[in-house]
Amino acid sequence: MSRGLMRVLAVVVLLCGAATGTTGCFTACPAIGYVNGAVVDVSAFPAVAAVQFCVDAECSPAPGEDETSSTNMFSTSRQDDGTWSLMFDMSTPEDVDIRLFDAQGTLIHEAEEAIAWTHTGGACPGPSTAEPLILQP
């Protein structure tokens, strides 16, 4: 074989090896949105009628606020078992400020709580869940 042909074959083998190495270990992730959620147990505060939470000065709607006025995707909802669900956007903050309000809209408790998140989406970015937060007076 000629020297030129040997060089061409060597280049082809190297390029094929490089192409195989870069495509074999890549995980394709779909471009989908998701929300992260946490559960808050407020049973120590029987008068709770509304819950608001904030992360870095971004808050879910306060009692009486229109949900469409918010610039984020934070929301709260009361569950049948008396707990409250906090729905975040795609973020997983380390701390959250939680405010509890009575039926008249009066603040009855405020606390900063740490959140321990567990990623549930495999190799791709995806939803995370948190250990329940139990508020105490």
Image (spheres, rainbow, N blue to C red):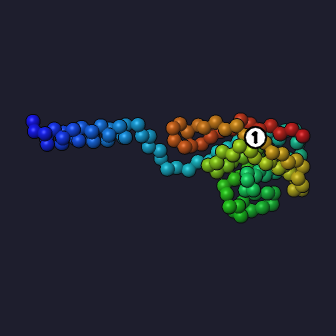
Residue 122: x and y in percent read 53, 36
Does residue 47 appear to the left or right of 78 in the view shown? right
Report the residue at 36% width, 40% height from top: 23
Say few, some or many: other residues with alpha carbon within 10 Å of mark 1 (under 14 / 14 to 19 / 20 or more). Answer: few
Q: Mark 1 sits on what residue?
A: 114
Location of the N terminus (image quadrant): top left
Q: Is residue 47 above or below residue 60?
A: above
Report the residue at 75% width, 46% height from top: 96
Q: Is residue 85 visible?
A: no
Report the residue at 60% width, 42% height from top: 127
Question: Which residue ends up furthest to the front in the rendered image?
Answer: 3
The picture quadrant where one finds residue 25 is: top left
Which sits in the foreground, 10 or 93?
A: 10
Q: How many marks?
A: 1
Question: Which residue ends up furthest to the left in the rendered image?
Answer: 1
Residue 84: x and y in percent read 76, 44
Residue 29: x and y in percent read 47, 44
- Amino acid beneath label 1: Ala
Report the residue at 32% width, 40% height from top: 18
Question: Which residue ends up furthest to the bottom in the rendered image?
Answer: 69
Q: Secondary structure at mark 1?
A: strand
Does residue 92 appear to the left or right of 11 in the view shown? right
The picture quadrant where one finds residue 5 is: top left
Q: Is residue 8 visible?
A: yes
Q: Is residue 24 above or below residue 31?
A: above
Residue 137: x and y in percent read 90, 40
Which sits in the foreground, 43 or 30?
A: 30
